């Protein structure tokens, strides 16, 4: 069976002192996890976290990557630069970037391509808004978002991770029920299956108010291969409980 992946997304939280404490507490409670573990940290703290996490079971993730390779793109961070700091995963197309930074399906697809070209695994986020769900458009929206990534990345698609994050569940305390999440994951799995013969090895994460109390019920679903955790990833004990739920 493939290993699950529990990835924290710290978003724009933390500072040098808090990061050291959080990672120290997580590492102290982490003995041989049954799943892969990663933390997505703000870019300015990559060096700090790289040095704390060296030789541990926790991989480093970035929260974004530039769609450009190099050059005059003020403020951007390239996949090559992330690779320099030992980054293993790059979150791309998070709904907060789609919503607040105007990221399109096509841009997200190119970001995934840049990450892959540098040997970084993109964690491609897809998910519908509440209005889209209520209009019965959930499948249509997530399939459109994933189709762009498949179109741009061809057979490399087998190397990505997909995170289904319903926008209405992010930071709201409203989690998709295990059945709701599984239903969308099955749709995504079928779409990946049509695109690559290696679809079974692609990890599909669920994200959106996943926490210590609801993780086990979500992680037991057949097409849920892990979680992308926001708020609960900032609390060592909660993050550890979610990791333990993979066993
Ligand atoms: P919350 O777990 O805080 O809802 O955030 C989920 C998320 O957006 C992870 O990327």
Image (cartoon, rainbow, N blue to C red):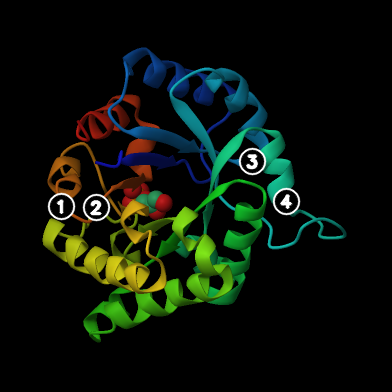
| Residue located beneath label 3 in the image | 43
| Label 2, label 4: how far apart the Cα atoms are | 30 Å
Question: Taking 63 as reference, is 246 above or below it?
Answer: above
Q: As drawn, is 139 to the left or to the right of 44?
A: left
Answer whether residue 160 is visible to the viewer in this image.
Answer: no
What residue is shown at x 45% (from left), y 64% (from top)?
95
Name which of mark 1 and mark 4 comes first in the sequence: 4
Q: Which residue is mark 4?
A: 78
Instruction: Judge left or right: residue 76 versus residue 1.
Output: right
Percent of width and height locating residue 125: 43, 61
Task: Looking at the picture, tell me which residue is in the foreground, 5 or 27.
Answer: 5
Q: Earlier in the sequence, mark 2 or mark 4?
A: 4
Single out the mark in the foreground, 2 or 3.
2
Marker disc for residue 224 = 2
Q: Which residue is under mark 1?
A: 221
- Disc nearer the start of the sequence (3/4): 3
Identify the element where label 1 is drawn: loop
Q: Quadrant of residue 194?
A: bottom left
Position of residue 212 measured from the top left corner of the image (x, y, whole percent): 21, 36
Q: Residue at x 72, y 50 (%)?
A: 77
Q: CA distance from mark 2 to mark 3?
A: 28 Å
């Amino acid at each position: 069976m493939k290993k699950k992946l529990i990835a924290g997304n710290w978003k724009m939280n933390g500072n040098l002192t808090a990061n050291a404490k959080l990672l120290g507490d997580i590492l102290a409670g982490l003995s041989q996890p049954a799943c892969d573990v990663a933390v997505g940290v703000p870019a300015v703290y990559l060096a700090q976290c790289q040095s704390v996490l060296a030789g541990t079971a926790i991989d480093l993730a970035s929260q974004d990557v530039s769609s450009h390779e190099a050059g005059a793109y003020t403020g951007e961070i390239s996949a090559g630069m992330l690779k320099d700091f030992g980054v293993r995963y790059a979150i791309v197309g998070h709904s907060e970037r789609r919503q607040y930074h105007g990221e399109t399906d096509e841009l997200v697809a190119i970001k995934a391509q840049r990450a892959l070209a540098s040997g970084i695994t993109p964690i491609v986020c897809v998910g519908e808004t509440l209005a889209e769900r209520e209009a019965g458009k959930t499948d249509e929206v997530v399939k459109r978002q994933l189709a762009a990534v498949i179109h741009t990345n061809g057979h490399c698609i087998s190397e990505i991770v997909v995170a289904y994050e319903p926008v209405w569940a992010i930071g709201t305390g409203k989690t998709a029920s295990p059945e709701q999440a599984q239903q969308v994951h099955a749709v995504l799995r079928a779409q990946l299956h049509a695109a690559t013969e290696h679809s079974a090895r692609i990890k599909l994460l669920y994200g959106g108010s996943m926490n210590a109390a609801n993780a086990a019920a979500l992680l037991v679903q057949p097409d849920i291969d892990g979680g992308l955790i926001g708020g609960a990833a900032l609390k060592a004990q909660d993050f550890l409980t979610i990791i333990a739920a993979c066993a």
